[in-house]
Image: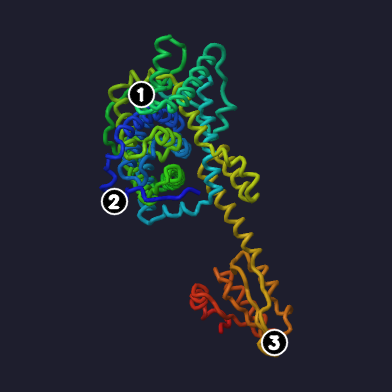
Amino acid sequence: MLSLRNNGYRTFLDNFDFTQNPKTDILSGFTVALALVPEAIAFAFVAHVEPLVGLYAAFFVGLITSIFGGRSGMISGATGATAVAMVGLVVIHGPEYLFATMILTGLIQVSAGLLKFGKFIKLVPYPVMLGFVNGLAIVIFLAQLGQFKIPKTSSLSGSVDPDSSHSALSVVFNGGWMDGLELTTMIGLTILTMAIIWVLPKIPVIKKVAPAPLISIILISAVAILLNLDTRNVGDMASVSGGMPLFHIPSIPWNLETLLIILPFSLTIAGIGLIESLLTLTLVDEITETEGRPNLECVGQGLANFVCGFFKAMGGCAMIGQTMINIDSGGRGRLSGITAALSLLLFIVFLSDLIEMIPLAALTGIMMMVVIGTFAWPSLKLLFRIPKEDAIVIIIVTGVTVIQDLAVAVVIGVIVSCLVYAWKSSQQIQITESESINDETHSYALHGTLFFGSIWKFKELIHPSNYSKKNIVLDLSDAKIADHSALEVLDTQTAKYHENGKRLELTNLSEDSLRILRKAEKVTSINVV
């Protein structure tokens, strides 16, 4: 595990320190903005809303989290994970209810940050993190395969509709593939983009000029335009053109019935958004060897989604793909995220015609390089060298991320890891003979943690029939009482000893164990000496 150090962003004013490397941050942010366009449009289609709803979300979420969030260099915007959770609401009740949902989602996320729930991300086991990274890399890869398929026509503005199914696997199994010259051109430009991104960083002079992904977009666009290649571009997905976002109060009944409709969706979107954002924050922490602020990130994400609800935007969370593009391009400061958001708005209002000419193959090639850089390749060897339980967790989280979604995968991974830990801990409890105090009293030492998982083994070890002496003193200097289950089994066994004419006593308890016993002393018959 990489060591962490303070990154210097410990006060609000430090968020506006642009002196580190402004040129790199600006160029990196501009590159990210270009990659945000097709993603925002695609996720808008997934959520069954207009493309501008996704583009405005990428602007607001990206800008606000870059300024007020807890992690510099991290990119946020409209995401597939949150878009999928919005579909049912939009289809049944319409987009106005979605905007109201995002207002409530923002309030929930801000509350989570103020209550310091962000710290719980530290409890996510490392195998779950590996599964998260590998799963998202596969999801990003499968999403790019959709660019090699014959586009379908959307009911929204008559534009191209990417697959809107809930599973990343549907990208592979649904729809027909391109063929002939069209497919060859798409593959060729994608590979050429990847080659440019791989080669340019090895040339020191060019490396200092601009990030390799930005140069690759310019070169591939020039090749496609000059040679008049028949290949899909951003404009084939949908029009990027639009005006400035305007303040708008959702047109819905503001009553209890509406609250009951949007609350379940708000809780779901808030949970998914925070999980993905905090895991991305943790990943960037390790890559950059710096330290983000999870609680502040919760507040930043919540504030962004709250604002989105008043500007007809679909909201979102952190985006690992665009974050990796930013990090790989050298973007480390908050200026990179701010530049990305402002550039995106510039594209929408003034430069839509130019942006719509960019070949999708160039952006696909960039994302393919993100896949290669994101996937934790050493984990493939680790699967055969780490405990099998951890290997199983990595595989489960990876698989569920691809088949279902990130939030479910992380929850399942954490639950499995906790169950594995509980089982292992339950097997470690044991009792060893200590010394004979007198003819009627003998002392034994308890080792391990007494909790809900270990009480069954403890019952077998401490049963009155196992000991011939009248009084048994149990030394807990190397043991700990952890929960109510432990208190219950101690109380039950003490009563059983009394029924058999014997006495069970506890001694040398730790302060934590004594504190638990003192709180429950009026409702238990446990003997402490």
Which of pointers 3 and 1 lies earlier in the amino acid sequence?
1
Q: Secondary structure at mark 1?
A: loop
Q: Which residue is mark 2?
A: 11
Q: Is residue 304 above or below residue 160?
A: below
Whichever of callouts 2 and 3 sits on the residue coming sooner in the sequence is: 2
Q: Quadrant of the C terminus?
A: bottom right
Q: Amino acid at mark 2?
A: Thr
**Residue visible at 61% across and 49% down?**
390
Disc 2, SS:
loop
Q: Which residue is mark 1?
A: 240
Q: Position of residue 39 (x, y in %)?
A: 43, 30
358 vs 30, nearest the viewer: 30
Say few, some or many: other residues with alpha carbon within 10 Å of mark 2 (under 14 / 14 to 19 / 20 or more). few
Q: State the image quarter where residue 352 is shown.
A: top left
Say which residue label 3 marks.
Answer: 470
Q: CA distance from mark 2 to mark 3?
A: 64 Å
Q: Give the structural element (helix, strand or loop) at label 3.
A: loop
Q: Amino acid at mark 3?
A: Lys
Mark found first going from the N terminus, 1 or 2: 2
Q: Nearer the viewer, residue 291 or 275?
A: 291
Query: Observer-nearest residue: 481 or 290?
Result: 290
12 on left or right of 83: left
Q: Residue at x 37, y 45 (%)?
A: 71
